[in-house]
Image: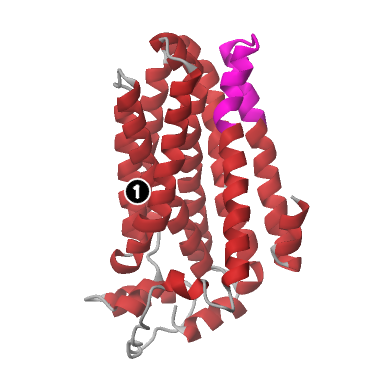
Amino acid sequence: MESNIQKLIDSSAMSKLQYGTILVCFLMNILDGMDVLVISYCAPAIAKSWEVDPEALGIVFSAGPAGMTLGALFTAPFADQMGRKKMIVLSALLMGTSIMLTAWTTTVTQLIALRFISGIGIGSMLASTAALTAEYTPNKSRDFWVSFVISGYPVGAVLSGLVAASVVPASGWQMMFKLAGLASFVTIPLILIFLSESIDFYFNRQPNNGLAKANKTIVKMGFEPVEAFPPRESKTSGIPVKRLLNDEFRISTIQLWIALFQAFGCLYFLTSWIPKMAETTGLSMSLAIYAGTVFNVGAWGGIILQGYFSSDSGLRKPLRCT
């Protein structure tokens, strides 16, 4: 974002537009949590209906995170060219379509393919909403607001668990996927109406009529409009990831990658398998789903606390405690 605008955001009280942007991003991460965890809540019913072994479900569970990785690494960066708002809409369409179609799958192969596709949308959504929130929030509270938006993920997992506990035993697992897909489609008009495009995108890409659109957002935040875009900065050569691996950042980058990989690996293992393991021990299908739901209630509290403490002490200390 243009430096003067960022300084104004850092030094001013947050506007309704900024709070609205945060809430829409929070809502989209609720959808992320719903769409990721719906397969875990439906897994016991699918396994019983199709008479498949747990090994086959392991591949299904892995397909979603694999797609999320691809989406976050390779799809989400296209938001720099097309705009974060458009990327969020595209991600919602991809999520809604693939989740809805899952209700009509009849084989494990079809299920794996659709879980992978939905994972691409989920990963793109997660990265885009976090980046957009960071752009619209002041530096002093940015860590908290980004954490708040990400906390929509376990909220969505909890809500989908509560719904699944009633819907799956009564109406079948297919109905749960239909409802989750419909929820994604319903949010698209909310994105189009209430979500603001990245000002950073307008200043960097300078599209046709971009100045007027940027000023409309800037004025809504209570700032004076800008008269013209600044000159475009020449792009630095080289691949950005390579710059993260130079002598200055190499050790810290590798440590961060390893820590996040292990943390997310543990997280997705637990969230994917808790309902199935609970059902295997003899719990009813509803209680097995509730077991996974309770886990995500704790996850929401942990994310909020981490965001609160990181605003004062930075991210390193709270992450060490976890």
Determine the residue positioned at 28% across, 79% down: 206
Q: Is residue 42 visible?
A: no
Dividing the picture into quarters, in which one does residue 142 lie? bottom right
Is residue 87 placed above or below 105 in the rendered structure? below
Magenta stretch encompasses residue 272: yes
x and y percentages locating residue 86 in the rendered image:
31, 58
Q: Is residue 42 left or right of residue 13?
A: left
Is residue 197 placed above or below 45 in the rendered structure? below
* Total marks in image: 1
Magenta stretch encompasses residue 83: no
Q: Is residue 171 visible?
A: yes
Determine the residue positioned at 62% across, 22% down: 290
| Residue receiving disc 1 | 91
Is residue 284 placed above or below 143 in the rendered structure? above
Tell me the amino acid under the disc marked 1.
Ser
x and y percentages locating residue 196 in the rendered image:
40, 63
Which quadrant is the N terminus positioned in?
bottom left
The magenta segment is 271-294
Residue nearest the viewer, comparing 51 with 308: 51
x and y percentages locating residue 136 in the rendered image:
50, 68
Q: From the image, give the main secondary structure of the stretch colored magenta.
A: helix
